[in-house]
Amino acid sequence: MTFRAGLLLTLPLLAVAETAEMLAGVVQEHGDSGVIKVMRQPLPSPGPGEVQVQIAYAGVNFIDIYFREGTYASTLPLVPGLEGGVVQSAGPGAEVWLGRRVAFVHKGAGGAYAEFAIVPAARLVPLGSEVELRDAAAVLLQGLTAQYLVDDTIRLQRNDTVLVHAGAGGTGRLIIQVAKLRGLRVIATVSCKEKAAVAQAAGADEVIISDYTTFASEVLQMTQNKGVAAIYDGIGNMTFLQGFSCLQPRGGMVLFGASSGFPRSVNLDVLAKGSKSLVRPTLFDFIAQDAELRTRAAMVMGWVQAKQLKLQTTILPLSDAAEAQRRLQSRETTGKLLLEVT
């Protein structure tokens, strides 16, 4: 009788679990932003070492576009997105996270364009009470990117001059601010007058309004033909080769993204003229260890708590996931674009 009673109690629970659903922005085939469809999906459950996060805000990042287009390998269908929410359930070994406010970043599509996401507990970043979920989602991925780019890719000295492309974008604004925290002079490029004001508000010392085809001559003029010590380029094909002409001797090109497409191969003679360097880093190599992720994240969140980073966000509902990616890819946005989920 005991066995039968236990069986009766378990079956209804299993039936509920099997039919539970959530809303998610799903990519079922590679293509433009129109392939993202917000639909009902089975509610996922965490396994060992995993947690189920109720998503508050999902960041809209270029990595999501790379997964959608198939530039980064993934299994379809997929749900893109990273950033933050509250842990609702936990698998074995992860119970300590229950009920905690967290942000997260891990390899793979992410799963945050949804009401719930399954996240490895090792990749969670705990949030202090002083940090709003919205701010954590606005800063984690791009703040980590800005921090490692400025601190760890090119050796710089205080008062060096650096060039930041797309200075009004989510990552560009944060690179400018981290560079200023490190005592660097910053020249930023933007595409229009309105975006110039955004880059200046972030702390850029000088701003070039350009279609990205003639910026090098202006950089040289601003630096008395010395050039810059480093270029932070997330645009790629449109800006890449021209950038080497305004790098100072022993300066470094940091290609961390390719919003205009990946550049063609570079002739190494370009580097030999002035002993210049080229780095093609990715964030995940700089947060590969869980402890390193949390150390870097603590630094970024500390800047947020101390109000040393000015955050700028545009918020759309989850139902507008496709439109959000379209806006990001067409460079219509400034600051960070978020999807409000719950």
Image (cartoon, rainbow, N blue to C red):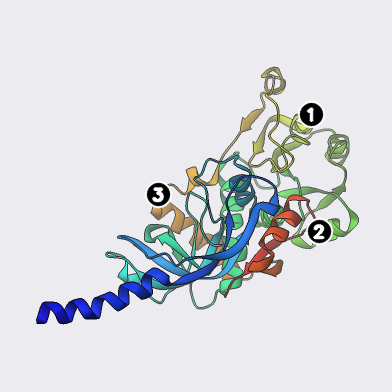
Q: Residue at x 22, y 80 (%)?
A: 8
Image position of 8 (left or right of 252)? left
Q: CA distance from mark 1 to mark 3?
A: 36 Å
Image position of 202 (left or right of 100)? right
Check disc 2 and report its element: helix, strand or loop: helix
Quick one: label 2, few (<14), some, or many (20+) residues within 10 Å? some
Q: Residue at x 40, y 53 (%)?
A: 290
Q: What amino acid is at disc 1? A: Ser
Above or below for 311 versus 74: below
The residue to which callout 2 is attached is 200
Q: CA distance from mark 2 to mark 3?
A: 35 Å
Q: CA distance from mark 2 to mark 1?
A: 24 Å
Q: Evaluate whether residue 100 shows in this view.
A: yes
Image position of 195 (left or right of 146)? right
Quick one: label 1, few (<14), some, or many (20+) residues within 10 Å? some
Q: What amino acid is at disc 3? A: Gln
The residue to which callout 3 is attached is 289
The residue to which callout 1 is attached is 245
Above or below for 18 versus 197: below
